Amino acid sequence: MKLFATALAAAALACVSALDLPTQLHIAYAGNNAGRSDGMSVMWHTDNATSTSTAKYGTQSGVYSSTVSGEERYYGFTYDHVAVLPNLQPSTTYYYIVGDDAAGWSDEFSFESGGALGTSAAPWKFMLYGGKSQGSCRCSALVSGFSHQLGRFFSSSFLFSQM
């Protein structure tokens, strides 16, 4: 029995290892030819090429009523994927996953689409994060410049930290 359980665990691990799950998901508003931002670009990375670059999305968690195909490009050590979710309804929460059946799917994430044209935007908050990666970083100069530029447009206070 112990040998069977060990073999089963090894087979399960091999299946999980064979997947090339999407990582580093990020989103950005996507405009259209009319100048409206009623879409959302979803970007992600995989270690290997995949059969498709697909995003599934919908307005209910776990229910993906729409599917779009995107593009894949190789950048040296990783494959970058992008898919645009078009014609989103204003001020609506969308749930999405990316990937494909062969390589595997991401966890579910969500976002709220932009407001309707002509409506006032609600106050919003955001976070900016950057790492040193390699070499030196003039973080204090970056934070100072960023704070100055934002202060020209926003009266809210911001918290910045260096590590």
Image (spheres, rainbow, N blue to C red):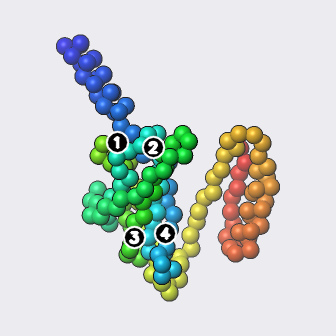
3 or 4: tag closer to the N-terminus: 4
Q: Position of residue 33 (x, y in %)?
A: 48, 78
Asked if residue 36 is positioned above or below residue 60 in the image, the reply reads: below
Asked if residue 138 is positioned above or below residue 20 in the image, the reply reads: below
Asked if residue 125 is positioned above or below residue 75 in the image, the reply reads: below
Contact (CB < 8 A) between labels 3 and 4? Answer: yes
CA gap, disc 1 and disc 2: 9 Å
1 or 3: tag closer to the N-terminus: 3
Q: Which residue is identified by label 3?
A: 86
Which numbered circle lies on residue 141?
none
Q: Which residue is identified by label 1?
A: 103
Which numbered circle lies on residue 46?
2
Q: Position of residue 125 (x, y in %)?
A: 58, 66
Q: Can residue 105 be seen here?
A: no
> Tag 2: residue type?
Thr
Q: Secondary structure at mark 2?
A: strand
Would you call the spot at circle 3 few (<14 residues within 10 Å), some (14-19), or many (20 or more)? some
Q: Secondary structure at mark 3?
A: loop
CA gap, disc 4 and disc 1: 26 Å
Q: Secondary structure at mark 1?
A: loop
